[in-house]
Image: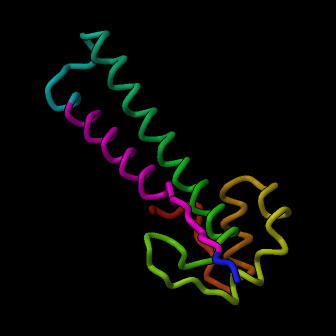
Amino acid sequence: MRAIADVRYSFTAQFFCGAAIFAQCAHAIEAITDLSINEESKAEHRAYVVGAIVQSAAALESEISEVVMYGPGHHLGSNGVDVSARDFISPMANVIDREQTLRRYEMVLHLLRKPQFDRGAEP
């Protein structure tokens, strides 16, 4: 008999935390600086805004990849993996992974018979 350990780290929460930190930093600059005057503050502000956007996009990308690989309910140590959904999606992982991020969410939601999201709605 042999034991196999499945150890992994989910980056989704880390990316969302990073995005929130960058957004807070951008907001702090907005609160104390007239961005139309100070070029250094403008550059720092843009860097934080771009960082927040990139971290948010990375979180979305990470989460849908993890759902396809490990199944819904895998995250944050919830131990609530929907095994039947994971087993259903798993054979289609290569096809799903070729799509753009939002299209992958649409495909997974459709395959799992979940409500689709409205691209024009506020998150």
| Residue farthest along the bottom direction in this orientation | 84
Dominant SS in magenta: helix
Direction from residue 18 to residue 102 in the image, left or right: right
Direction from residue 2 to residue 123 in the image, left or right: left
The C terminus sits in image quarter: bottom left
Q: Residue at x 70, y 73 (%)?
A: 108
Q: Which residues are magenta?
A: 4-28
Q: Residue at x 29, y 33 (%)?
A: 26
The N terminus sits in image quarter: bottom right
Q: Indicate whether residue 22 is drawn in magenta.
A: yes
Q: Residue at x 63, y 70 (%)?
A: 67
Give the image location of residue 24, x and y in percent.
26, 41
Direction from residue 46 to residue 120 in the image, left or right: right
Q: Quadrant of residue 87?
A: bottom right
Give the image location of residue 36, x and y in percent.
28, 15
> In this view of the protein, which residue sits in the foreground, 79 or 117?
79
Give the image location of residue 39, x and y in percent.
31, 9
